Amino acid sequence: MMNRDEQIMLLESMAGIFIRCFFLTIALLFLWVVFFFLLGDWAYYLHSRWFELSSQAYDLLFYYGMALIKTCAFIFFLFPYIAIKLVLRKIIKS
């Protein structure tokens, strides 16, 4: 069984990992947006050779992909980070 200090250290470590993963995911999204705006036409040309996509469908897929990654970042990294911080606040107060 872990004592109180070990629990706090474990939760702080986990919170640090979650927030780093969240920021890395946001950085990935930023790179994705930069890639989309700078090389979007080239990427469309490349993908349209493999798949029959209109330009609008390609843009829509890109935006859906970005929305999915952002949603996953919030659900899997930011919300657990906030929950851990709330638990830590409660543990430290008591």
Image (tube, rainbow, N blue to C red):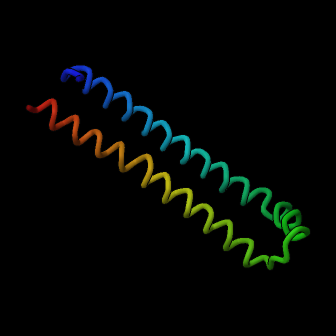
Q: Residue at x 62, y 63 (%)?
A: 65
Q: Residue at x 44, y 50 (%)?
A: 76
Q: Residue at x 60, y 52 (%)?
A: 29
> Where residue 30 sits in the image (x, y, percent)?
61, 50
Answer above or below: position of 30 versus 66. above
Q: Residue at x 43, y 39 (%)?
A: 18
For the N terminus, the quadrant is: top left
Q: Residue furthest front?
A: 1
Q: Residue furthest left?
A: 94
> Where residue 84 sits in the image (x, y, percent)?
29, 40
Task: From the viewer's side, name the closer residue of 80 and 20.
Answer: 80
Seen in the image, is 44 located left or right of residue 92? right
For the C terminus, the quadrant is: top left
Quadrant of the rendered structure where residue 60 is? bottom right
> Where residue 78 sits in the image (x, y, percent)?
40, 48
Answer above or below: position of 68 versus 90. below
Task: From the viewer's side, name the closer residue of 64 and 34.
Answer: 64
Seen in the image, is 8 located left or right of residue 33? left
Seen in the image, is 58 located left or right of residue 29? right
Answer above or below: position of 61 versus 88. below
Quadrant of the rendered structure where residue 13 is? top left
